[in-house]
Image (cartoon, grey):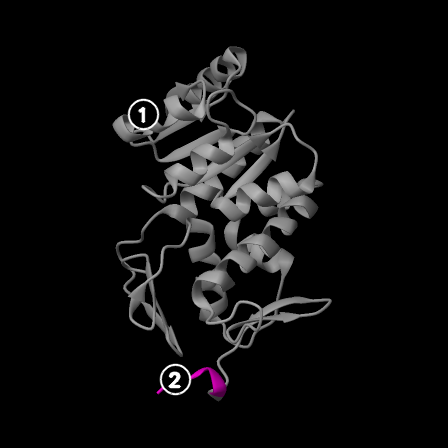
């Protein structure tokens, strides 16, 4: 059964182009012209991934993702013509998994789609549970609990946390973590990697707000200045 992608863009030519291209690549494609219509379509079509423009009438991309994240954890890739880094960061902070800046190449977009879909899959065979301090990550059920309470993570945040927890004390560069999210495409994205690496910082910041008691003084995800990040499992993170 083909995966369903919801394309949200107020430009009809963009919707048509993406629908035709992605249909040829084997996806089922549904479209919407603004955020309000997209919410309706998403509730009825239940897409596996959303390609979301930011600048739209009625309800823009930011408005859509705020509402959508209250209902679903479906992965979202932003399609943005804005060049300001703060706009991209805001989208990631609201719950987007990745972004592509217009104009974009179709091959790059397809690579991003496959990577995000792959890391959003909930594995069936693996039942490995990772624990550290008050954090419990279950690969089998694709769930995370902190102090016994469920925590909602985006697919990207889940995979980043899993990578860090699976190799405690190892220092990961941003490129290492990028490859954890894009294992096959990382080497082919070329000049795009620098921009994608910036998203790692945003995902880590979002993770800290969800799993740390005090995100400004993280106990679990440590920053190794000039290098990257590591997961701390020292005795002071253990809670009795």
For label 1, the residue is 40
Q: Residue at 63% x, 58% y: name it.
A: 174
For marks 2 and 1 on the same chain, the one whose residue lies earlier in the sequence: 1
Q: Quadrant of residue 100?
A: top right
Residue on which disc 2 sits: 239
Residue 206: x %, y % from top left: 51, 56
Left/right placement of residue 103 relative to residue 78 reads right
Work out which quarter of the rendered image holds the N terminus and state it: top left
Q: In this rendering, would 159 be left or right of 79?
A: left
- Residue 57 picture location, percent across and down: 51, 20
Give the magenta range. Answer: 236-240
Residue 27 visible in this rendered orientation of the protein: no
Using a 10 Å C-alpha cutoff, classify the residue at mark 1 as few (fewer than 14 neighbours), some (14 to 19) or many (20 or more).
Answer: few
The Cα–Cα distance between marks 2 and 1, rounded to whole angstroms, is 44 Å
Name the residue furthest front: 58
Q: Is residue 40 left or right of residue 183?
A: left
Nearer to me, 134 or 173: 134
Badge 1 element: helix
């Amino acid at each position: 059964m083909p995966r369903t992608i919801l394309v949200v863009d107020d430009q009809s030519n963009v919707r048509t182009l993406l629908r035709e291209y992605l249909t040829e690549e084997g996806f089922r494609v549904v479209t919407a012209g603004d955020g309000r219509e997209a919410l309706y379509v998403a509730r009825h079509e239940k897409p596996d991934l959303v390609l979301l423009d930011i600048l739209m009438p009625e309800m823009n991309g930011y408005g859509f993702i705020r509402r959508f994240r209250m209902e679903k954890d479906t992965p979202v890739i932003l399609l943005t013509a804005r060049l300001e880094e703060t706009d991209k960061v805001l989208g990631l902070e609201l719950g987007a998994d990745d972004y592509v800046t217009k104009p974009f190449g179709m091959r790059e977009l397809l690579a991003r789609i496959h990577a995000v879909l792959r890391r959003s899959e909930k594995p069936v065979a693996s039942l490995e549970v990772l624990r550290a301090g008050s954090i419990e990550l279950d690969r089998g059920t694709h769930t995370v609990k902190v102090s016994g309470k469920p925590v909602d993570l985006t697919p990207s945040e889940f995979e980043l946390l899993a990578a860090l927890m699976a190799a405690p004390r190892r220092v990961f560069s941003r490129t290492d973590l990028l490859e954890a999210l894009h294992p096959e495409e990382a080497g082919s994205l070329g000049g795009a990697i620098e921009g994608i690496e910036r998203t790692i910082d945003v995902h880590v910041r979002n993770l800290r707000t969800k799993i740390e008691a005090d995100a400004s003084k993280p106990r679990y995800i440590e920053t190794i200045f000039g290098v990257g990040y590591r997961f701390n499992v020292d005795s002071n993170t253990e809670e009795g």
